[in-house]
Image: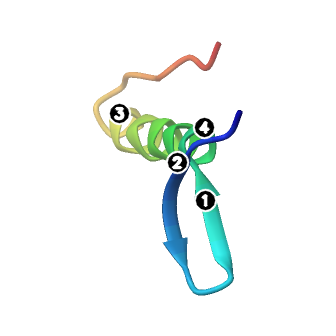
Amino acid sequence: MEYIAHKDGERVQTVKEHLYGTAELAGSFAEKFGNTVHML
């Protein structure tokens, strides 16, 4: 079962897609401080 995080007209983003995107952004911010985020 997929859960919807965002829906904008025709565009739908699942919770999984949202969380992976958020993790990617967090990783890019962490790199500025010499840290990384590891994806499972």
User: Sequence-wise, which precedes: disc 4 or disc 3?
Assistant: 4
Q: Position of residue 40 (x, y in %)?
A: 65, 13
User: Sequence-wise, which precedes: disc 1 or disc 3?
Assistant: 1
Quarter of the picture holding the N terminus: top right
- Relative vertical location of residue 4 with respect to residue 31 in this rendering, above or below: below
Q: Position of residue 33 (x, y in %)?
A: 28, 31
Q: Position of residue 14 (x, y in %)?
A: 61, 49
Check disc 1 and give the amino acid type. Gln
Number of the front mark, 1 or 3 = 1
Q: Is residue 4 left or right of residue 32?
A: right
Circles 4, 3 touching at the beta carbon (< 8 Å): no
SS assignment at label 2: helix
Residue 18 is tagged as 2
Circles 1, 2 touching at the beta carbon (< 8 Å): yes
Q: Nearer the viewer, residue 38 or 31?
A: 38
Residue of label 4: 16
Residue drawn 35% across the image and 43% down it: 29
Check disc 2 and give the amino acid type. His
Residue of label 3: 30
Circles 1, 4 touching at the beta carbon (< 8 Å): no
Residue drawn 58% across the image and 86% down it: 9
Check disc 3 and give the amino acid type. Ala
Q: CA distance from mark 1 to mark 4?
A: 8 Å
Q: How many marks?
A: 4
Residue of label 1: 13
Q: CA distance from mark 4 to mark 2?
A: 5 Å
User: Which residue of the protein is positioned furthest toward the bottom in this rendering?
Assistant: 9
